[in-house]
Image (cartoon, grey):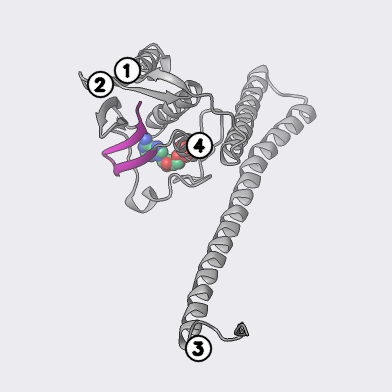
Amino acid sequence: MPKKKNFDTPELSVEELTKALYEVNLELQASNNQILEEQRKNKEFYANISHDLRAPITAISNSLQYLLSSSDITPDEQHETLLMMQKRTSYIENLINDIFLLSSLESSSQKVHKEEVDLRFFLEDYFYMCEDDDRFSNCELQLDIAEDFDAKAMIDPVLMQRVLDNLFSNSLKYSRENLRIMLSAKVVDHNAVISVEDNGIGIEKEHLEHIFERSFQVEKARTPDASSGSGFGLSIVKSIIGHHGGCINCQSIANKMTRFTINIPII
Ligand code: ADP
C-alpha cells in the first residue's frame, strides 16, 4: 500500500520559519518605506510645479490688469511690462516642455532614435557651434579631445545635444568673471568619457548629492524668465544618459569649479 503523504508537516523547524517570516517582514517594511519616500517626492514635485507655474502666471495676470486699468502709462512703461510678460511666458513654455520631456523619458514613451555616431565629429561640431554662439562670446571655450579618441557610439544625436546644451548653459548661468568652459573626451575601458568643466561658482558639498533630483535648485528665489531654469535640467540629462546605458556624475568645489563626467559605452 502506498504511504500516505503528510502535507501538514513543515519541512522547516519553527525557529527557521520564524526567522524566514522575520526576514520577509523586514523586506516588506523596506519596500513600504521606499514607496512612502516615492510618494513624498511626488507630492513635493507637484507642489514645486504648482508653485513654479503659479508665480509667473500671477505676475502676468497682474501686469495685464495694470495695462488694462491704467490710463496714463507711458510707451516705455508699456514696452517694459510687455517684455516682462514675454519673458515669463517663455519661462512657462520651457517649464512645460521640460516636464513633458522628463515624464516621457521616465515612462519610456519618449522615442529614442539611436544611430551610429562618430563621437569626435559630434563633439567637435557641438563645440564649434558654441564658439559661434553669441551667448559664449565672453567666455573662453576649450576643447580637449584625446588624439587617439576614435569612438563610435549608438546615440540619439538630438537628445545627446540636449545634454550638452544643458551642461553648457548651466556653466554660463552659474558663472563668475573670466568664465572658462572645457569640453573633453577620452576612452576608458570601452567607454567614452566626456566631461564638461567650468570655473564658475561651483556647488556646495551638501547640495551636490541632490542636483540630479527632479526639480532641485540650489537657489529657488531667482526671477523666472526664459533663461532661468526649471530645476529639471539635470534630471533630464541623467535620464537621457541612462537611456544610452551610461551614467553621469558631478564633482565640484564651491567658488572654484564644476565638472560633469559622462560615461557611455562605445561600439
Ligand atoms: P536649473 O534649472 O536650476 O539650472 P538644473 O537641474 O540644470 O536646474 O541644475 C540643478 C542645480 O544644480 C542648479 O539650480 C544649480 O544650483 C546647480 N548647478 C548645475 N550646474 C551647475 C554648474 N555648472 N555650476 C554651478 N552650479 C550648477
Can you identify the residue that label 3 sits on?
14
Q: Give the crowd class for mark 3: few <14, some 14-19, many >=20 residues within 10 Å.
A: few
Residue span colored magenta? 247-267
**Is the magenta region chiefly helix, strand or loop?**
strand
Q: CA distance from mark 1 to mark 2?
A: 7 Å
> Residue 108: x percent and y percent?
59, 38
> Are discs 1 and 2 less than 8 Å apart at CB?
yes
The image quadrant in which ligand 1 is located:
top left
N-term-proximal mark, 1 vs 2: 1
N-term-proximal mark, 2 vs 3: 3
N-term-proximal mark, 4 vs 2: 2
On residue 175, which mark appears? none
Return the residue found at the far top. Answer: 132
Nearest the viewer among 251 and 121 is 121
Rendered image quadrant of residue 151: top left
Amino acid bearing label 2? Phe
Nearest the viewer among 48 and 79 is 48
Can you identify the residue that label 1 sits on?
120
Can you identify the residue that label 4 sits on?
236
